[in-house]
Image: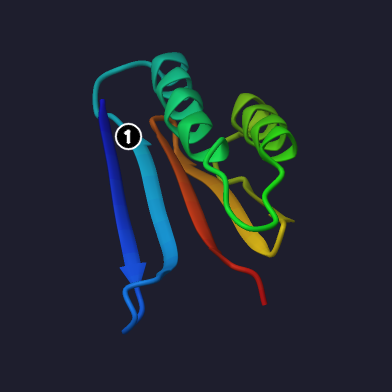
């Protein structure tokens, strides 16, 4: 399984957005789902101005657990948009960006 991340910074070196993924070409979906759950959990508990880590963590865990191939789900917490998607049996993606 591969865990991947990319960050976009502005000219002041402030975080604008981040993209994260858990993918595999071999492991079964359940293993990749567990990897995504742990990886995204670590991101859900990062605090920022206006964060609500409990709400974010619950939403991420419920979304990953119930996600089907082709689903795209999003929510906004404290001015930050979280979007989770799955485009194949062995992939989960999380995009985090400023809302608005």
Give the vertical position of 7 relative to 86 (above or below).
Answer: below
Instruction: Please tell me which residue is depicted at 65% across the width and 33% down the height of the picture.
Output: 57
Q: Residue at x 44, y 31 (%)?
A: 89
**Residue positioned 56% across, 38% down in the render:** 44
Q: Position of residue 15 (x, y in %)?
A: 41, 66
Q: In this view, does 77 lie above or below 71?
A: below
Quarter of the image containing the C terminus?
bottom right
Q: Quadrant of residue 13?
A: bottom left
- Residue in the picture at 59% in, 31% down: 64
Image height check: is 35 above or below 50? above
Between 41 and 52, the residue placed more toward the observer is 52
Instruction: Determine whether, in the image, residue 9 is placed left or right of residue 74.
Output: left
- In the image, 50 versus 43, the foreground residue is 50
* In the foreground, 28 or 1: 1
Residue 10 point in image, percent of width and height:
36, 79
For this view, does 11 lie left or right of residue 62?
left
Q: Is mark 1 on a helix, strand or loop?
A: strand
Return the residue at label 1. 23
**Protein image colouring:** rainbow
Q: In this view, does 22 lie above or below 79?
A: above
């Amino acid at each position: 399984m591969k865990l991947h991340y990319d960050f976009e910074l502005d000219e002041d070196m402030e975080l604008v957005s981040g993209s994260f993924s858990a993918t595999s070409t071999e492991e079964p979906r359940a293993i990749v789902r567990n990897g995504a759950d742990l990886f995204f959990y670590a991101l859900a508990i990062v605090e920022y101005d206006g964060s609500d880590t409990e709400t974010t963590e619950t939403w991420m865990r419920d979304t990953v657990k119930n996600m089907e191939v082709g689903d795209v789900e999003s929510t906004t917490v404290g001015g930050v948009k979280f979007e989770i998607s799955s485009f194949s049996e062995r992939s989960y993606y999380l995009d985090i960006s400023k809302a608005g």
